[in-house]
Amino acid sequence: MKRSLFACGLALLAVMGVAGPGRAAAPAPVDWPTPADPATLPQGAWRDMVMYGQKLIVRTFSVLGPEVPDPAMRYAGNNLACQNCHLNGGTQRFGLPLIGVYGAFPAYMGREDEVRTLEDRINGCMERSMNGRALPADGKEMKAMLAYIQYVSTGIPVGKNIEGRGSAPLPLLKRAASPMRGATVYQKTCAVCHQPDGQGKRNGAKGDAGGYQFPPLWGPDSFNNGAGMHRLIAAATFVHANMPVGTTYTSPALTGDDAWDVAAYINAQPRPVRAHLERDYPNRSRKPVDAPFPPFADSFSLQQHRVGPFQPITDALRGKSPAP
Ligand code: HEC
Ligand code: HEC
């Protein structure tokens, strides 16, 4: 748990006051909300559940990780935390926030070509980002995550796509991203925390379910190749807006070129492999241009889907220019 949840405890209450029950929802809450620390909620079952959900997001490895004592609870296949990507407990603007996400589901998901619930979406990250298995939809852990996501989404109207969701957009490169150039950026800018071999730095010792001070970016304890972060556009936009940690989208530390190249370098490294990725995006025309696995609706190379340039693929799919 980091600073922002504790920061301005009253901001959320102010928002709730405006949009409380019995009033017409005020359009356009403008300021990025800073949810109060759930510990300030009144004692009771709701507070307990929200706080358990917060723990599951912030310290996932300590409850659901592969090193917890009870084998039945080892749902995650790696020692990451949701918060490693959903920064500051999912409260950071353009740091893949969970704020506002409660009212964004159910939603159409191209990966399955169907309408999916928030439970399904959470399990998507369990199976890919966490390289594990799905949580039971009606179990305590899923309920707790939903409670926490609902809590941080309080005051955001259902169906309103909050500005600051995802990662801040970044102009596409005209050239292919270069993993080789990215290696130099990595050793200069990232290795100090994520380590020269990309395996991160643990909080404690292997086997103690203590997670990471600096999470691994590749290797056996990282996200698998079916994860969102393994798509170049997702990774480059995340890194540009948020890395090195402490960076925000308003003052990025990396140039756009450096972010694209370092993301391409990370995603060229070995990581756990997810079976049957060819079954993702059964409607091929809905497949993101940066999905780095076949088959594709177009005839661009796998390499171009991995590292770009992406604009020609987008143009061809929109019928603006011919595929090669
Ligand atoms: C390695 C990074 C990473 C980790 C760890 C991770 N996620 Fe995600 N998550 C992502 C990315 C990237 C996306 C957006 C994917 C996309 O563009 O489709 C995402 C999307 C989501 C969404 C949908 C957000 C939205 O705006 O629609 C939810 C909910 C979610 N994750 C929950 C979780 C939970 C819960 C955990 C822990 C159990 C978790 N994630 C762990 C990277 C991660
Ligand atoms: C000062 C230390 C530091 C530096 C330097 C740094 N990071 Fe991170 N990075 C972190 C921490 C800490 C997290 C996890 C955030 C959290 O849990 O709050 C993280 C998370 C990540 C993640 C998502 C989690 C995962 O395991 O994949 C990616 C991707 C990432 N960093 C890439 C980079 C890249 C690329 C660079 C260099 C441009 C970089 N980082 C530089 C500390 C750092």
Image (cartoon, rainbow, N blue to C red):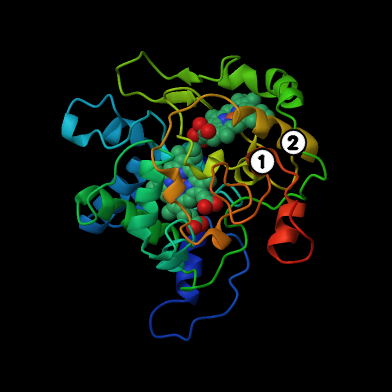
At x 38%, y 80%, the residue is 21
Q: Which residue position holds label 2?
A: 177
Label 2 with label 1: CB-CB less than 8 Å: yes
- Count of numbered labels shown in the rendering: 2
Tell me residue 161's x, y (percent): 56, 67
180 up-or-down from 59: above or below: above
Quarter of the render that holds ligand 2: top right
At label 2, the amino acid type is Ala
At x 57%, y 24%, the residue is 269
At label 1, the amino acid type is Ala
Whether residue 289 is visible: yes
Label 2 sits on a secondary structure element that is loop
Q: Residues within 10 Å of mark 2 (few under 14, many from 20)?
A: many
At x 44%, y 67%, the residue is 107
Q: Nearer the viewer, residue 321 or 13?
A: 321
Residue 236: mark in rendering: 1
Residues at marks 2 and 1, CA–CA distance in whole angstroms: 10 Å
Label 1 sits on a secondary structure element that is helix
Q: Quadrant of residue 304?
A: top right
Task: List the single residue furthest toward the right.
Answer: 174
301 up-or-down from 102: above or below: above
Tell me residue 231's x, y (percent): 58, 43
197 up-or-down from 241: above or below: above
